[in-house]
């Protein structure tokens, strides 16, 4: 049995446990907040690794940011992580083998290996939370590209409405189909659509309306909220059709916080009505909130194990 | 040595020759027009095959249309081919092994194996002619998807201007970035932009202006033609950035008739200014007009040869 210390590194919290080559947890899952400076973060990593080092074979990180092709470092600056994160030498953190993978890629691998897409050789996992991340499995392999940075579907331009993305470019998929995108759509709809006048949120200013307001409004059958959500879904679907036509996947797996608000059957039907390739299945993620850790552990096992 | 009878089947002409496993031509390249009905087409295939059958090991077709995952038949109806083409049983045409591949995929494989992308494990070939086709090589493998239909980048929505594509959907990449797209852009610009009034084409009606007019107009330094071409290039670049961000390829190879009018360095600089992955190279196709035949032959060799 191979034992992997898997560490999921996000902007606000760090989650870790020990996982075997079947994706099973061998230890309690622990969590802690992400330190705000790079020295503290490095020390925290060392402390976590020291705790398990005698009983594990590999250390594997699932992390925000673009990971290099040899899975040893983070190459991009990631806005939510401490400055200098892209200079961190992960290999020197442990005397065991160390592996690093982007969290969206790791999640896709977990879905493919043990989750909702198990056994499907061509599958896409779209993580919809604050942003939009993509992990692409083609022919049973993780798409990483020449530098390891592949899968940046959030940067795909899907229309020409002129919405400014957090990356400063216009009309990125992420600025429409993410949770932040829903808030953006709520704002624009409040400015332009008269349903807002009769909405339960009419006493708020347009920029005060949150993603959660809209979700709550839908449950209240609020016409404005329903309209906002409908526009959001249409934008989500455009991007999913774009990638389905390129990858012709068996399934698209929806992961991330927004997943629970999505009717996968509705999305699946809308996609299959329009795609030019063969029909896809749309499913919610099956590997749960720990898909990043699990995927990173399984990928590390594939790379380093000799079993 | 493996000898492949390679047949490139297009809507207007059929081109064929014998090619070895290194992509070298062993016979003169012959061509004939594509018959208008399926019986004639089938008889033509049989006649061509009979001529070479005693000296070859494999018959391989590069064809318009979506090819099934086992590379034995065309599954979609293809507008320019005789009715019933998608019912044709390619395997029964010969007593040798028969292989079928989509022409855009075959072209990408030829570029990867012996053309402009030789040795690059992650490369995309975009064929820009009447339409837009895509062939994607990831990690040294041809992306085919679950059904063999993958790579349909021409159907990617890139904006929301409302242009109707030949497929009846709105705002497909193909309706902007193809030769037909250039004609569409010429039409819309003639209606909306005052440079048309002073253009060398001002005596034509907007729908009379052809792709070739614009190309000719650029050489004459006609302001309207330059403007049309500039809009067309911007649309072309949006789509190339979208796919570069997903695939993180080493190169994008431009193939097809429109290639000769494109300044690859200009396109490359524009892409690299905006992509979030690492820089790509943009190059013109190196495998020439016979990349379909060559790619189909090489793919068939990989599938059937035991050398």
Image: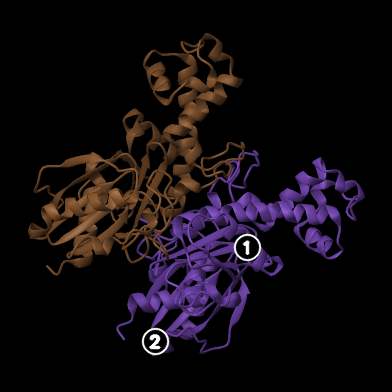
Chain colours: A brown, B purple
Q: Position of residue B159 (x, y in %)?
A: 60, 43
Task: Return the disc, 1 or 2, that comes first in the chain's sequence.
Answer: 2
Looking at the rendered image, the quarter that the N terminus of chain A falls into is: bottom left
**Left or right: B206 as drawn, with respect to A165:** right
Residue A202's place in the image compared with A278, above or below, is above
| Secondary structure of residue under mark 2 | loop
Q: Which mark is residue B2?
A: 2
Is residue A73 visible to us here?
yes
Q: Which mark is residue B269?
A: 1
The CA distance from mark 1 to mark 2 is: 41 Å
- Observer-nearest of B186 and B210: B186
Q: Which mark is residue A57?
A: none
Q: Chain of mark 2?
A: B
Residue B41's place in the image compared with B23, above or below, is above
**Left or right: A2 as drawn, with respect to A162:** left
- Observer-nearest of A233 and B20: A233
């Amino acid at each position: 049995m191979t034992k992997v210390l898997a560490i999921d590194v996000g902007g606000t919290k760090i989650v870790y446990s020990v996982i075997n080559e079947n994706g099973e947890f061998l230890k309690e899952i622990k969590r802690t907040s992400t330190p705000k400076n790079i020295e503290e973060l490095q020390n925290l990593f060392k402390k976590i690794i020291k705790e398990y080092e005698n009983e594990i074979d590999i250390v594997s990180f699932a992390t925000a940011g673009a990971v290099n092709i040899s899975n040893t470092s983070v190459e991009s600056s990631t806005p939510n992580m401490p400055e200098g994160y892209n200079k961190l030498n992960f290999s020197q953190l442990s005397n065991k083998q160390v592996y690093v993978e982007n969290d969206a890629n790791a999640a896709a691998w977990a879905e493919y290996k043990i989750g909702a897409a198990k056994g499907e050789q061509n599958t896409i996992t779209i993580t919809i939370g604050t942003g939009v991340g993509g992990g692409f499995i083609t022919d049973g392999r993780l798409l990483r590209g020449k530098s390891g940075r592949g899968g940046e579907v959030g940067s795909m331009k899907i229309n020409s409405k002129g919405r400014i993305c957090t990356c400063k470019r216009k009309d990125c998929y992420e600025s429409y189909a993410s949770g932040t995108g829903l808030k953006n759509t709520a704002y624009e709809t409040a400015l332009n659509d008269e349903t807002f006048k009769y909405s339960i949120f009419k006493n708020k200013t347009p920029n005060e309306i949150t993603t959660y307001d809209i979700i709550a409004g839908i449950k209240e059958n609020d016409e404005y909220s329903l309209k906002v959500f409908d526009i959001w879904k249409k934008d989500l679907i455009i991007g999913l059709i774009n990638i389905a036509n390129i990858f012709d996947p068996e399934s698209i797996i929806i992961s991330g916080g927004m997943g629970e608000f999505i009717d996968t059957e509705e999305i699946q039907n809308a996609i299959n009505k329009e795609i030019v390739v063969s029909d896809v299945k749309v499913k919610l993620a099956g590997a749960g909130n720990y898909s990043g850790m699990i995927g990173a552990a399984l990928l590390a096992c594939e790379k380093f194990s000799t079993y």
